[in-house]
Image (tube, rainbow, N blue to C red):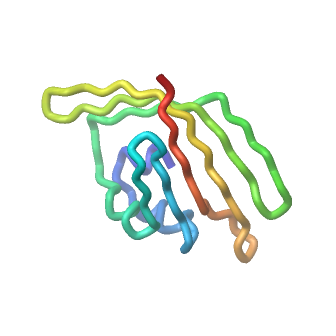
Amino acid sequence: MIRAQINGDKSVFEKYLADNYGFFDAGMHKSMDRTKAISKIKANSTFSKTCGNYQLIPEGDKALLKSVCSYTAKELVFISNIKAEFTHRFAKFNGQWKLVYEEKREIF
């Protein structure tokens, strides 16, 4: 999904985000639903992201995935280097895993 985000490939997100998907950015105190999140996906060659420290916690037809990501974003002349912890909640719908909820917390 990281590559799809960088390339602006909305079809990947349309396939894997649950209808009741929600995103919360704890640092910015902003949230988005599925429609708004997909609308924000645009190709961005000035954006790079790498993730690691994955922890997968399965819970039957649900799963929790935690990761730490570092990313760089260029806007005009400004460059932001950000490190954040992501929590992803997945659930199985009709046999297919869907992303239900994401939360981002920046690490300082």
> Residue 75 placed where, x, y %?
20, 35
Is 26 placed left or right of 41 in the picture?
right
Q: Residue furthest left?
A: 76
Is 78 placed left or right of 85 in the picture?
left
**Foreground residue among 83 and 42:** 83
Is 101 placed left or right of 44 in the picture?
right
In percent of the image, x 75 and y 71: which residue is there? Answer: 95
> Residue 79 placed where, x, y %?
25, 26
> Residue 8 placed where, x, y %?
34, 53
In percent of the image, x 14 and y 33: which residue is there? Answer: 76
Is 57 placed left or right of 14 in the picture?
right
> Residue 92 placed where, x, y %?
73, 67
Q: Residue furthest right?
A: 60
In percent of the image, x 68 and y 45: which residue is there? Answer: 65
**Foreground residue among 12 and 72:** 72
**Count of all numbered marks drawn on residues in the image:** 0
Classify 54 as above or below 88.
above
Classify 100 as above or below 55.
below
Q: Residue furthest front?
A: 29
Quadrant in the picture for residue 66: top right
Quadrant in the picture for residue 63: bottom right
**Foreground residue among 34 and 9:** 34
In percent of the image, x 52 and y 32: which residue is there? Answer: 69
